[in-house]
Image: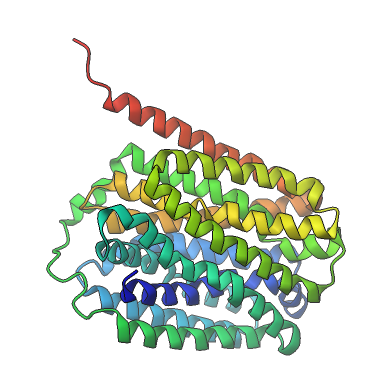
């Protein structure tokens, strides 16, 4: 892969670390802020909703700016937002800081995906997206467990200071290796043309697939720390190494999903969502034993992120050349809307429903709705391509 794509991956690493880091610090933050675990989970929902709002707004606001300047500006917002998280004295201010940080997320991945696909041959576009998202998977593999470890030793505020430092490094890498003229000469389409992407049924169905598919994942993953400690019987110190297993699964699944999508997008889309549902169902018996829980968490990471490149490429194909950046930003927003929905649904299940033990089945049912939308979308697409019969 070209070096600029790898530089984009470095930025994705920083953003991915802050998105997921709270999951390894859930109990510590709840204790410090004197709120419930479910309320702490809403810090994830708040971040995700900030992405959902910020992605289309910042994408459209920066559409005429140089691509490199946009990427650097977004990384600066990310760094300042994490510093604000570290300093937040109250739950409300921590939530506000999380929302501020989230504003950079969707537009970074949307702009970055378009830049990455423009640097490679057409047949390698899904792999380029997967390479950029490798930064996100490495963040989960290394950044999140490292953050959880720092939080355990030095407190959760130290973990956010560490992420702010990662942001500074990522800013420097992007400044050095992303070409200054990247994206120049590509005049943005008229605003009305870009917004027309929202009128395309296949794009909207693609966004719905993403929301539902990832709502299933985050129904369970948001509460992975209490699930492993309270149901499986692991100590809090054991959660960080188990998150390494999850991150390793993400890395494998992300790259595999990119290759499968390059070969046959339709099969990759259906197959990866189906496997994710299967793994979520298998979590129910697996979570009862320590070896089974560790294996299932690794498989969950692989299955979940195998869906990323197919879902991104599906929206990219259906958006058309004039709406790609906005569509991809909206798809990242859809990932995070699923994140918010899953975190909320998991919290409701824990506090007002049957509890932690059934989270995998609730998650599987939500992802199954995403698979149903995918099958409907592909069937509708086939019908649209059939020649009219006189």
Residue 280 x/y as whole percent: 68, 47
Q: How many marks?
A: 0
Judge from the rendering whether residue 127 lies leftward or rightward of residue 238; answer left or right: left
Q: Is residue 29 above or below residue 363?
A: below
Q: Is residue 270 above or below residue 333?
A: above
Compare residues 326 and 285 and report the one nearer the observer. 285
- The residue lying at 44 percent from left, 88 percent from top is 168
Residue drawn where x is 52% and y is 71% of the image = 16
Depth order, front residue of 368/85: 368
In which quadrant of the rendered image does the C terminus lie? top left
Residue at screen point 59% across, 69% down: 20
Which picture quadrant has residue 170? Answer: bottom left
Task: Identify the image quadrant of residue 59.
Answer: bottom left
Can see residue 315? yes
The structure residue drawn at horizontal position 40% and vertical position 28%, both measured from the top left corner, is 379
Q: Position of residue 103 (x, y in %)?
A: 43, 70
């Amino acid at each position: 892969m070209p070096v600029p794509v790898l530089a984009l991956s470095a930025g994705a690493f920083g953003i991915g670390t802050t998105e997921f880091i709270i999951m390894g610090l859930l109990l510590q933050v709840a204790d410090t802020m004197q709120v419930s675990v479910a309320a702490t989970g809403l810090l994830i929902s708040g971040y995700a909703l900030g992405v959902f709002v910020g992605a289309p707004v910042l994408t459209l606001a920066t559409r005429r700016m140089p691509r490199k300047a946009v990427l650097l500006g977004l990384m600066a917002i990310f760094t300042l937002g994490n510093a604000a998280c570290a300093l937040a004295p109250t739950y409300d201010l921590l939530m506000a800081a999380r929302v501020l940080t989230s504003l950079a997320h969707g537009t970074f991945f949307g702009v970055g995906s378009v830049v990455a696909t423009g640097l490679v041959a057409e047949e390698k576009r899904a792999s380029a997206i997967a390479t950029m998202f490798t930064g996100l998977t490495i963040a989960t593999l290394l950044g999140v467990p490292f953050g959880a470890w720092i939080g355990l030793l030095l407190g959760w505020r130290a973990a956010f200071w560490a992420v702010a430092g990662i942001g500074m490094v990522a800013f420097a890498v992007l400044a050095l290796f992303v070409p200054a003229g990247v994206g120049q000469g590509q005049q943005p389409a008229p605003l009305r043309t870009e917004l027309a992407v929202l009128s395309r049924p296949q794009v909207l169905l693609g966004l719905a697939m993403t929301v539902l598919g990832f709502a299933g994942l985050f129904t369970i993953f948001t509460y992975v720390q209490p699930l492993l400690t309270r149901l499986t019987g692991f100590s809090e110190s054991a959660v960080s190494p188990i998150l390494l297993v999850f991150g390793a699964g993400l890395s494998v699944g992300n790259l595999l999903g990119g290759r499968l999508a390059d070969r046959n997008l339709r099969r990759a889309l259906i197959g990866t969502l189906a496997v994710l549902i299967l793994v979520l169902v298998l979590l129910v018996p697996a979570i009862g034993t320590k070896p089974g829980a560790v294996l299932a968490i690794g498989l969950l990471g692989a299955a979940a992120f195998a869906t990323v490149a197919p879902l991104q490429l599906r929206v990219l194909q259906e958006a058309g050349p004039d709406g790609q950046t906005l569509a991809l930003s909206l798809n990242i927003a859809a990932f995070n809307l699923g994140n918010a929905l899953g975190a909320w649904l998991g919290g409701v299940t824990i506090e007002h429903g049957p509890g932690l033990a059934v989270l995998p089945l609730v998650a599987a049912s939500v992802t199954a709705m995403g698979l149903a939308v995918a099958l409907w979308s592909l069937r509708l697409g086939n019908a649209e391509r059939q020649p009219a019969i006189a």
